Amino acid sequence: MQDNAANHLTYRMGASGWEIAWSDGATAQVRNGEIASLFQMRDTVIPDYLGQLDAIASALASTVNALHQTGMTMQGTPAGAFFDGNSAGSISVNAAITADTRAIAATRVASATGDGRLAAELALVTEQPLIGNQTLGQAAASMLGQIGHAVRGATTAREAASTLQTQLDNQIMATSGVNLDEEMMNILIFQRAYDASARVLTVADEMVRTIIDRLGVR
């Protein structure tokens, strides 16, 4: 924006990465700084974490559903899926179960009172290695650890950049800035030199007057 004229900016993926383009065709590559970090966060970091969350949700849904569908409901009918959806954003408990909890399967045999073996198997799902060689809890903890490590790294980098900026600012001030303490000291020195010069002139004037008086020169 300059005066009453505005240059419209757009961003796009160029041959060497993200770039900002002006309406007149000029471009600037975005490689460092806050804008580049935001692009990286949007295009790489967040999708990676969302992918890990989706993998956890998908493994949970598919494993629980496969077990649940081998059982019988309390009404004596074959059980359906326990979860709908297979991603972190879509997974939810089956609407039939939320409407009537008797649709939950706890046994594989119809009317088998007290047989909770299927329920026990479902409870053990969280202890099975479903994401590679990790349990669901371990996979979630690993992802949280990655986030924590990334946050620490970003915090350290920001503090280092802030320290470097402070050092550079101090160097600039040392070479081109004004040191108030030093300037005040110089003012005092100049003032004392002026006072001393004034006293010398006063003494010289008095000496001249004395000489003139003694010589009787009028």
Image (cartoon, helix red, strand yellow):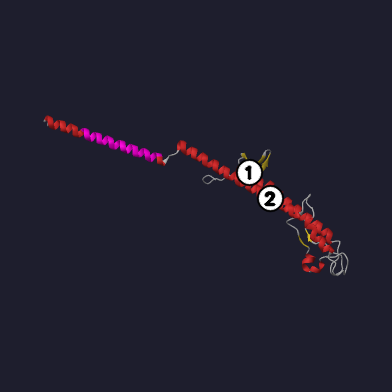
Give amino acid for label 2. Gly
Q: Is residue 42 left or right of residue 174?
A: right
Indicate whether 2 appears above or below 61: above
Residue located at (59% from left, 45% from top): 158
Residue located at (64% from left, 48% from top): 151
Q: Position of residue 140 (x, y in %)?
A: 72, 53
Indicate whether 38 appears above or below 101: above
In reply to whether residue 146 is colored magenta, the answer given is no
Which quarter of the figure has residue 181? top left
Residue located at (15% from left, 30% from top): 211
Can residue 162 be seen in the rendering of this structure? yes
Depth check: 27 or 115 in front?
A: 115
Q: Secondary structure at mark 2?
A: helix
- Say which residue label 1 marks: 36
Binning the other alpha carbons within 10 Å of mark 1 as few (below 14), some (14 to 19) or many (20 upward) gives some
In reply to whether residue 185 is colored magenta, the answer given is yes
Residue range in magenta is 182-204
**The C terminus is located in which quarter?**
top left
Indicate whether 103 appears above or below 136: below
Give amino acid for label 1. Ala
Q: Position of residue 171 (x, y in %)?
A: 49, 37
Which is closer to the viewer, label 2 or label 1? 2
Q: Secondary structure at mark 1?
A: helix
- Say which residue label 2 marks: 145
Binning the other alpha carbons within 10 Å of mark 2 as few (below 14), some (14 to 19) or many (20 upward) gives few
Disc 2/disc 1 C-alpha distance (Å): 24 Å
**The N terminus is located in which quarter?**
top right
Mark 2 or mark 1, earlier in chain? 1
Q: Is residue 128 left or right of residue 6?
A: right
Depth check: 103 or 36 in front?
A: 103
